[in-house]
Image: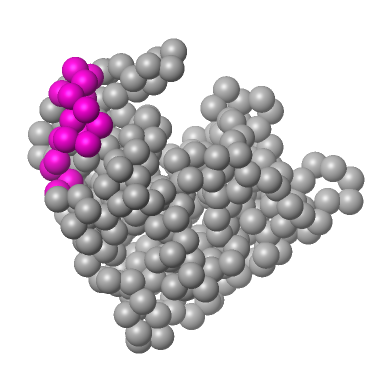
Amino acid sequence: MTTQILTQVKKTFSALDCTGGGVIINKRGHTVLEEYFGVQGQQDGAKKVGPHTLFHLASVRKTYVGFAVAYAIYHNFIHSIDDKLSDYLGDQEVFESVTIRHLLTHTHGLRWQKERIMKEFKAGYNWAYRDVNVELLAKIIFKTTGKTIAEIVDEHVFQTLSFTETNWFGNKFDKHIEVIHHDSPFWYESDVCDGSKMNMYSSLKELAKWGQVHLDKGQVNGKQMIPKEIIQLSTSIQSPNVKPKYSPTNGFFWFIQPQVIEGVTELSPILPEGSFQLLGYTSVALLVIPTENIVAVRGFNGFGSPQGFDYLKDIHEFGSTVYQSIR
């Protein structure tokens, strides 16, 4: 039953400009598929991809950023996601009417322009994927908790769950997969490891475990390791009502399947209501289908889409294949 999934993932691997990949599928807490293929880089003698290979998460890291925000709300460091940015970052004109909810759901209307934050549209009235939201949330988290995103995640996720293969990295080691980026204008490296940058890597095994924690609402082996309220807050629809109907529906960054699908989304349209997913620019993806007790993870090391590659069609096929193969 998992043959179709592996075939679909290898089809994507062949279409991308990458050297290695992998896939893990959990059903009812048990791993039913775990496969790795290719090598970790372009150089001669590159190591084979395996269970301990660390993949660049790109935007999938935002599940951890979202956790830090939910943690701050749960512990009353932040009063509400409807708090205005000006309450925390000063009364700047560009922040007018922008709330934390808008940052979390890509409806904030802000963007970087020549190292300045500019207003692209009125908050809540459109949807646009801009990384300025992560950097602003990082500032709010630090101002309210006195800790960085990375410090919160390390203490309350990595240490709690005994994760040793997930983190923000300023330096690369032999476990890190090479990111094939071909001087993409969107690629950058950073030695800042406070959680505000995209230099986060993880093994697929730990990424799948993190997805399983979400599926089980914070429990591991029947023990509540993370407050279920944090998980529920992160994976519930938080998009403002005034956003355009054709826009995606988000929780704390997670793309969430609504009851009625009206807009473009990264989730396959056949996935049931309440499914949630994150997809990175490296084509790494984490999909959770609660109604079917499924967690699906895939990883590659190509940055961006080659000419002719339809990333939305591909991620829809991944979700559809997973759902239809092992539901």
In the rendered image, the residue lying farthest to the bottom is 222
Pick whichever, 76 or 115, lies toward us.
76
Horizontal arrangement in the rendering, residue 18 relative to residue 319 (left or right): right
Q: Position of residue 124 (x, y in %)?
A: 16, 31
Horizontal arrangement in the rendering, residue 46 relative to residue 231 (left or right): right
Horizontal arrangement in the rendering, residue 136 relative to residue 1 (left or right): left
Q: Residue at x 39, y 35 (%)?
A: 135
Which residues fall within the magenta stretch? 80-96
Q: Residue at x 68, y 28 (%)?
A: 182
Is residue 322 visible in this depiction of the protein? Answer: no
Residue 90 falls within the magenta-colored stretch: yes
Residue 211 falls within the magenta-colored stretch: no
In the rendered image, the residue lying farthest to the top is 114
Pick whichever, 299 or 80, lies toward us.
80
Q: Residue at x 57, y 22 (%)?
A: 185
In the rendered image, the residue lying farthest to the right is 44
Q: Quadrant of residue 217?
A: bottom left
Q: Position of residue 221 (x, y in %)?
A: 41, 85
In the rendered image, the residue lying farthest to the front is 146
Pick whichever, 237 or 2, lies toward us.
237
The image shows residue 289, relative to residue 73, as above or below, that is: below
Horizontal arrangement in the rendering, residue 6 relative to residue 255 (left or right): right
Colouring used for the render: one colour
Q: Report the quarter where the C terminus lies.
A: bottom left
Q: Position of residue 144 (x, y in %)?
A: 27, 47
Q: Position of residue 311 (x, y in %)?
A: 48, 38
